Amino acid sequence: MKGRFITFEGGEGAGKSTQIQYLAEALRALGHDVVMTREPGGSPGAEAVRHVLLSGAAEEFGVRMEAILFAAARSDHVEELIRPAVEAGKIVLCDRFMDSSRVYQGVTGNLEPEFVTALERVAINGMVPDLTIILDLPAEVGLARAAARAGSGNPDRYEKEALSIHEKRREAFLEIAQKEPERCKVVDANQPADSIAQTIEKLAMEKLAIEQPAIERQAVSKLPDEPPKRKSPRKKSSAKAASSDITAEPQ
Ligand code: Z5A
């Protein structure tokens, strides 16, 4: 069976990493082979570019340069990790993907849409997500969560930007969801993590059920309504913990 590609999007501190952990646990409990990954990064080449981008080292060269670096990292990630995993029947859960470039570099970076679209086409090379979960949250709530997690650590290149920019990004994500309702599902992220996880699990299961052949769909429909009791996923450390199982996943 062909696998699935599910992406998580939203502003800083929206809970993407937390929810990926929850969904991975739920899907694994049902016997699925799950790969967790993130952007920028996820493959050795892309992880090398991640530091350049998040440290702000590329900022002085302009947003066009940053957009190309994000695209270069994405291309490596798609070809080295995402596509092989999906073709091997795995479910890939990815923390940020092409919609982040549309929003951060396109909308708030003021890049021309044609430029962003052209980069996207080359970088994803047809690897459009089957489902994108957009975690929606007032920017100040997300930033407060991210700041609490970071403690006294320095905010990254993007976290230190003005609140109005973060709000603009929130609107931009919602606009993408409006334009692509089949792919994108908006989830209210201003709730306890556990109830968000249940909503996302339902959306993911619907996607898997709809797109699976009838015989597999029948098996899925026999699942209990309530998801299995799960323990809280492990907490991420301050610097967004380089997603240990992310980079350690098989290529
Ligand atoms: N970027 C870009 O510009 N263009 C691109 O194409 C791509 C990315 C791919 C990556 O940063 C940066 O790169 C990003 C955009 C840019 N901008 N920034 N900053 P990153 O990978 O370091 O960080 P992030 O993607 O923004 O994620 P994050 O800030 O780490 O947040 P998160 O993953 O969405 O949230 P979390 O880690 O799951 O939760 C944050 C804290 O809140 C944590 O302490 C949790 O325990 C807590 N939490 C989680 N859920 C809840 C609920 N429901 N209630 C209360 N507290 C919660």
Image (cartoon, grey):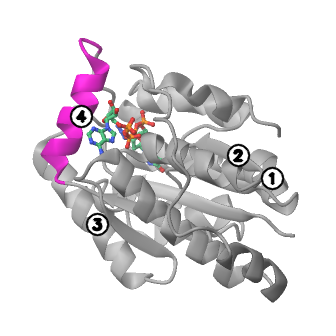
| Sequence-first disc among 3 and 1 | 1
Where residue 236 appears, as percent x and y from the top left, is: 45, 26
Query: At numbered mark 3, what does the secondary structure look like: helix, strand or loop?
Result: helix
Q: From the image, which quarter does the C terminus lie in?
A: top right
CB under 8 Å between discs 2 and 1: yes
Where residue 239 appears, as percent x and y from the top left, is: 42, 21
- Callout 1, which amino acid? Ala
Q: Is residue 158 visible?
A: yes
In whole angstroms, how far apart are the C-alphas of marks 4 and 2?
26 Å
- Callout 4, which amino acid? Arg
Tell me where residue 44 sits by quadrant: top right
Circle 4 residue: 145
Q: Residue at x 56, y 67 (%)?
A: 204
Q: Residues within 10 Å of mark 2 (few under 14, many from 20)?
A: many
- Ligand 1 quarter of the rendering: top left
Q: Is residue 146 magenta?
A: yes
Tell me where residue 121 sits by quadrant: bottom right
Instruction: Please state the extent of the stretch shown in magenta in the rendering.
Output: 138-153
User: For disc 4, does the CB lie below 8 Å from ligand 1?
Assistant: yes
CB under 8 Å between discs 4 and 2: no
Circle 3 residue: 172
Q: Residues within 10 Å of mark 1 (few under 14, many from 20)?
A: many
Q: Is residue 75 visible?
A: no
Circle 1 residue: 85
Mark 3 vs mark 2: in front: 2
Is the magenta region chiefly helix, strand or loop?
A: helix
Q: Is residue 180 left or right of residue 161?
A: right
Work out whether residue 32 or residue 79 is closer to the camera in this orientation and state it: 32
Query: At numbered mark 2, what does the secondary structure look like: helix, strand or loop?
Result: strand
